[in-house]
Amino acid sequence: MLASSSAKRLKAEGIHVNNDIQAAEWFLNPHNDVRSCHFLEDAGTEFLVQGLELDWCLVAWDADYRYEANRFKHWSFKGTKWQNVKDEFQKRYLENSYRVLLTRARQGMVIYVPLGDDTDTTRQSKYYQGVFEYLQTCGLKELLATS
């Protein structure tokens, strides 16, 4: 499981973005080791996977990189709220973070876009809906859970 290093509100989805993962343990430990990627407890970031080819990836998308009004918008979570990123260097950095995450998989990838929660001002459904719809226009298919 992968996520942007700035994906701070995925925690509410049970996805912990961990910038301090020990790469050898995360990549190489067996499936029954809680420190391994197999447990899906800690999301690796662009720093951990840059330059690597991974067989399968689950990429979790947060509200830091939103699609609104026919373009991507850049956000940073500070304290208790999202702030619009104005610095051009920081915008390129965020774009490149997602570019790295979306280009690691060799065999297949699932992109997880949260539904959001309109009772939580930091995870409004509109923050995620635009990117979900955009990815569908790119040809991605929605996976539905079955009971």
Image (cartoon, helix red, strand yellow):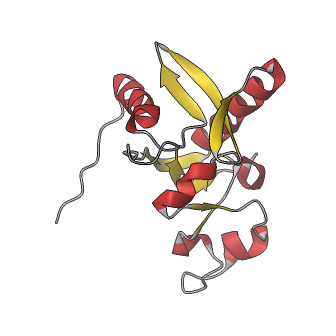
What residue occupies the far bottom of the structure in this picture? Answer: 32
Residue 140 spot, x, y in % from top left = 36, 34
Q: Can you give x and y, in whole percent of width and height, for residue 78 in the image?
A: 72, 43
Asked if residue 70 is positioned above or below residue 55 in the image, the reply reads above
Residue ID at (77%, 31%): 93
Total residue callouts: 0
Apparent side of residue 95 relative to residue 113 in the rendered image (left or right): right
Of residue 118 and residue 50, the one placed in the foreground of this image is 118
In the rendered image, is residue 56 in sight? no
Q: Residue at x 36, y 27 (%)?
A: 133
The image position of residue 129, as x and y in percent, is 38, 32
In the rendered structure, the answer to whether residue 51 lies left or right of residue 17 reads right
78 on left or right of 55:
right
Q: Quadrant of the C terminus?
A: bottom left
The residue lying toward the viewer, choosing from 67 and 40, is 67
**Location of residue 115 with respect to 44 vertically, above or below:** above
Residue at position x 49%, y 42% from top?
121
Residue located farthest toward the top when viewing the structure as drawn = 70
Q: Quadrant of residue 31?
A: bottom right
The answer to which quarter of the image holds residue 135 is: top left
Can residue 119 be seen? yes
| Residue 89 in the image: above or below residue 41 | above
Residue 3 spot, x, y in % from top left: 61, 50
Placement of the N terminus among the 4 image quadrants:
bottom right
Q: Is residue 146 above or below residue 127?
A: below
